[in-house]
């Protein structure tokens, strides 16, 4: 949802680094034999991600071993991530740290809100062992987003959540909010598809929004904001209050943060202020 640059890391080199200190020598030798397959899978992955087609990589699922992720080569490959990249002091840990740092201002690119202090596999490593340490498949993410997606695998294009390295909808306004009237005034966030979007992209953004429970996440933030706004506007003439709301909405431009969506909604619905709904908020 909030794109970040694809890491400037070569998949084959990253894999070789992770494997370099593997013991025993027998396991290391086996992993080295898999390097070409890992590099080829990474190449396919990047091409598919660039065209929104990760769902089409079904032939890579459960490879190279078949369908048992807990044994043989598949276990060795997933171990490359857990023991040889994510583990502190491991051969690939510097790469892991570099990926975490690629999050803009430490913020999770999947929700735009949490701290990006974990790595999420866009295609889960348990189902795609060959992609366990492929840099383009490793996205910095907050823990709730990482857990929310879990091991989900897209079966069709519409089921793909957005990929922060390859999908960019940040240039268009798509996040909107609806104000609900008394007796229980509230704010509901939702996706307002941009007219230029294809049906597939619309489905993907909505899938992303639902998967990471962004409506609930953003709705949980508004209390403090509206309570502070209510305090600030208290006693001000109605016209001045409306002008303030419009100024704040304009200051967010075309952003898709929950604050931007909230102020756009407030600016478009002056009844929310006039009816005293704003005064009912507390933090
Ligand atoms: Zn997140």
Image (cartoon, helix red, strand yellow):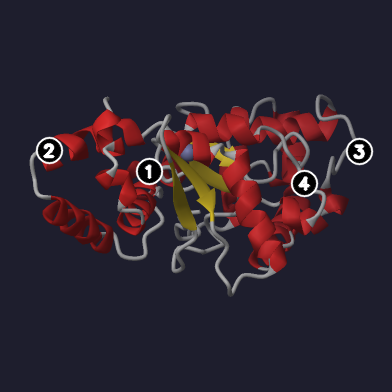
Give the distance between the C-alpha atoms of the residues marked 3 and 4, in whole angstroms: 14 Å
Q: Mark 3 or mark 2: which is in front?
A: 2
Q: Nearer the viewer, residue 120 or 223?
A: 223
Residue 32, position in %: x, y?
A: 72, 44
Contact, CB < 8 Å: mark 2 with mark 4?
Answer: no
Instruction: Assign a secondary structure to mark 2.
Output: loop
Residue 38 vs residue 110: left or right? right
Instruction: Assign a secondary structure to mark 4.
Output: loop
Residue 235 vs residue 159: left or right? left
Disc 3 under 8 Å from ligand 1? The reply is no
Q: Which picture quadrant has residue 54? A: bottom right
Residue ID at (39%, 35%): 115
Residue holding disc 2: 234
Task: Mark 1 or mark 3: name the one nearer the start of the chain.
Answer: 3
Residue holding disc 1: 107
Instruction: Assign a secondary structure to mark 3.
Output: loop
Q: Mark 4 or mark 1: which is in front?
A: 1
Task: Mark 3 or mark 4: name the one nearer the start of the chain.
Answer: 4
- Residue 27 marker: none
Contact, CB < 8 Å: mark 3 with mark 4?
Answer: no
Q: Nearer the viewer, residue 241 or 134?
A: 241
- Residue 34 marker: 4
Q: Residues within 10 Å of mark 3 (few under 14, many from 20)?
A: few
Give the distance between the C-alpha atoms of the residues marked 2 and 4, in whole angstroms: 67 Å
Task: Mark 2 or mark 4: name the one nearer the start of the chain.
Answer: 4
Residue ID at (66%, 32%): 150
Give the distance between the C-alpha atoms of the residues marked 1 and 3, in whole angstroms: 37 Å
Give the distance between the C-alpha atoms of the residues marked 3 and 2, in whole angstroms: 66 Å
Residue holding disc 3: 66
Residue 103 visible to the viewer = yes
Task: Mark 3 or mark 2: name the one nearer the start of the chain.
Answer: 3
Instruction: Assign a secondary structure to mark 1.
Output: loop
């Amino acid at each position: 949802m909030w794109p970040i640059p694809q890491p400037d890391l070569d998949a084959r080199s990253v894999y070789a680094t992770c494997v370099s200190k593997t013991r025993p020598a027998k396991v290391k030798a086996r992993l080295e034999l898999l390097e070409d397959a890992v590099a080829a899978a990474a190449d396919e992955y990047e091409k598919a991600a660039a065209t929104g087609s990760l769902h089409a990589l079904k032939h890579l699922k459960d490879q190279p071993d078949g369908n048992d992720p807990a044994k043989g080569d598949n276990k060795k490959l997933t171990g490359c991530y857990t023991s040889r990249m994510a583990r502190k002091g491991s051969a690939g840990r510097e790469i892991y740290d570099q990926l975490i740092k690629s999050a803009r201002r430490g913020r999770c690119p999947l929700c735009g809100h949490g701290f990006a202090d974990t790595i999420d596999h866009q295609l889960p490593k348990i189902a795609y062992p060959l992609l366990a340490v492929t840099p383009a498949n490793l996205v910095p993410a907050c823990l709730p987003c990482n857990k929310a997606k879990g091991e989900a695998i897209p079966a069709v294009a519409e089921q793909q959540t957005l990929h922060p390295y390859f999908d960019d909808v940040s240039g268009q306004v798509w996040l909107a909010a609806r104000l609900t009237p008394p007796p229980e005034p509230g704010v509901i966030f939702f996706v307002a598809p941009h007219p230029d979007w294809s049906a597939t992209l619309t489905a993907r953004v909505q899938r992303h929004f639902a998967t990471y429970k962004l409506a609930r996440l953003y709705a949980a933030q508004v209390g403090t904001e509206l309570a502070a706004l209510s305090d600030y506007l208290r006693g001000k003439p109605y016209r001045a209050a409306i002008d303030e709301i419009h100024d704040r909405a304009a200051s967010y431009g075309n952003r898709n943060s929950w604050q931007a969506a909230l102020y756009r909604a407030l600016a478009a619905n002056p009844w929310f202020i006039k009816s005293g709904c704003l005064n009912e908020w507390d933090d």
